[in-house]
Amino acid sequence: MAGVSMEEASAHDLHYQFPPAGAYRLNRCLFALKSDREFLARYLADPRAAAKEMGLDGNEVRDLLAGDRDALLAHGAHAYLVFMAALRVRMEREPSDFEYF
């Protein structure tokens, strides 16, 4: 970054960036996994169909089904939604003593 010190550049790199508009469908899917029990049930029954229902492209579907956090972030997914969606799916697949939140 021209005219910016290393400290300022580092602070800029750490600053939150809003997800790109092109990642809307992916983030909407992740939000639904986190928040919508009916969608989560459909996803658990048929993950590929549920992802397609949300309009995800082939690469997004592949990375979502693989649980590839880094690839999802590269597609523009919001880090919080990636984490929470994965947690919610894991909680349903592997019931434990987690409280619902």
Image (spheres, helix red, strand yellow):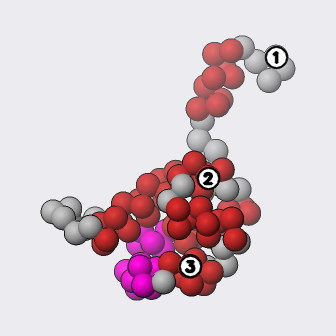
Magenta segment, principal secondary structure?
helix
Eye-nearest disc, 1 or 2: 2
- At label 1, counting other C-alpha atoms closer than 10 Å, the crowd grade (few under 14, some 14-19, many 20 or more) is few
Question: Can you say whether 50 is above or below 92 in the image?
Answer: below
Which of the two residues, 2 or 76, is positioned nearer the viewer here? 76
Q: Are marks 1 and 2 in contact (CB under 8 Å)?
A: no
Residue under the image location 44 percent in, 64 percent down: 85
Question: Can you say whether 39 is above or below 17 in the image?
Answer: below
- At label 3, counting other C-alpha atoms closer than 10 Å, the crowd grade (few under 14, some 14-19, many 20 or more) is some
The residue where tag 2 is placed is 71
Q: Position of residue 46 (x, y in %)?
A: 48, 83
Name the N-terminal-most of marks 1 and 3: 1
Q: Quadrant of residue 75?
A: bottom right
| Quarter placement of the C terminus | bottom left
CA separation, marks 1 and 3?
47 Å
- Find out whether residue 85 is within the magenta segment: no
What span is in magenta?
Answer: 31-45
Query: Which disc is residue 48 wearing?
Result: 3
Q: Position of residue 6 (x, y in %)?
A: 68, 15
Eye-nearest disc, 1 or 3: 3
Identify the secondary structure beneath mark 1.
Answer: loop
CA separation, marks 3 and 2?
17 Å
Q: Position of residue 50 (x, y in %)?
A: 54, 82
CA separation, marks 1 and 2?
32 Å
The residue where tag 1 is placed is 3
Identify the secondary structure beneath mark 3.
Answer: helix
| Quarter placement of the N terminus | top right
Amino acid carrying label 2: it is: Ala
